[in-house]
Image (cartoon, rainbow, N blue to C red):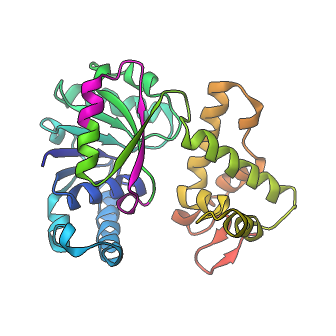
Amino acid sequence: MGLVGVIGAGVMGAGVAQNAAESGHEVILIDLTEDVLQKAKEEIKKNIKFQGLFKKKDSRILDEDILGRITFTTDYEALREVEFVVENVPEVWEVKKNVYTRLNEVCAEDCILLVNTSCISITKIAALCKQASNVIGVHFMNPVPLKSTVEAIRGFHTSETTIQQTKDFLESMDKEMILVNDYPGFVSNRLSHLLMNEAAFVVQDQVAEPRDVDEIFKKCFGHKMGPLETADLIGLDTVVNSLDILYESYQDPKFRCAPLLRKMVEAGQHGRKSGKGFYDYNYGFVVN
């Protein structure tokens, strides 16, 4: 197994690091502060214990060895010998730009860069990189260790070699990839964000309460989660950032962010990670 760098120790980055370590890879997990990294370590430890209930023991490395395969650091210099980098920073262009500037300075020329983005064009990101042919979008689903499929995105310059090496890497993590072409939002988020946004408009217009909206989608359409539960899981701030990118990219009013979503984010109600979004995760009540 290879050496993998993971940028961003939030929910997605921690999940990718855990999944890669469970699969036998050595992982370098990078974030800006030691506090964030410590929080990620505790979250991974908790998730290993919980998710072990859903996995076959003989298909995994022993739980106690998983954390030992992850190096937690703020130093990009640790990435000089990695074969793959999975980037998971927020959907903010200036943040992404700064990360890829750093990666250009330290990563080997043959390192494959996996962009775990919700909506930003892979081709636009690849334009920042010295080896654009090594850049590919890989949109992991949350929670990463429990999801068996990812959406992979071919940028304008992505090579067939990069696609095959990425496919092999994902297979080592027991994941299938579905390859699509590059337009902002790709398939999953171009569709799902429309649904989450319109569900927020439904609540804003007082057509229904959040729980009723989600129950209709679960009980009438067989969805495992409703659109507002999904938005809370992703993070309402991430949803708003992604909608803004889609609106800017297509100049189509269908991507106009619901004012209620923006208001909730401004109030610090980001969903599960903040304890409150459309639902109150501290007490289990719906937010009115």
Can residue 251 be seen at all in this image of the molecule? yes
Asked if residue 129 is among those painted magenta in the image, a careful observer would answer no
Picture coordinates of residue 258, whole percent (x, y): 75, 46
**Is residue 157 on the magenta stretch?**
yes
Q: Is residue 270 visible in this depiction of the protein?
A: no
Kindly identify the residue that appears in the image at 59 percent across and 74 percent down: 281
Q: Check the picture and name the quadrant holding the C terminus.
A: bottom right
Q: Is residue 263 above or below residue 22?
A: above
Note whether 232 is above or below 279 in the view shown: above
Q: Position of residue 77 (x, y in %)?
A: 17, 38
Query: Along the line of sight, which residue is nearer the eye, 115 or 147?
Result: 147
Kindly identify the residue that appears in the image at 45 percent across and 39 percent down.
Answer: 117
Front residue of this view, candidates 32 and 288:
288
Residue located at (55% from left, 43% from top): 188
Using the rendered view, name the quadrant where residue 203 is placed. Answer: bottom right
Q: Which residues are magenta?
A: 143-165
In the image, residue 288 sits, relative to residue 83, either above or below, namely: below
Q: Is residue 16 left or right of residue 82?
A: right
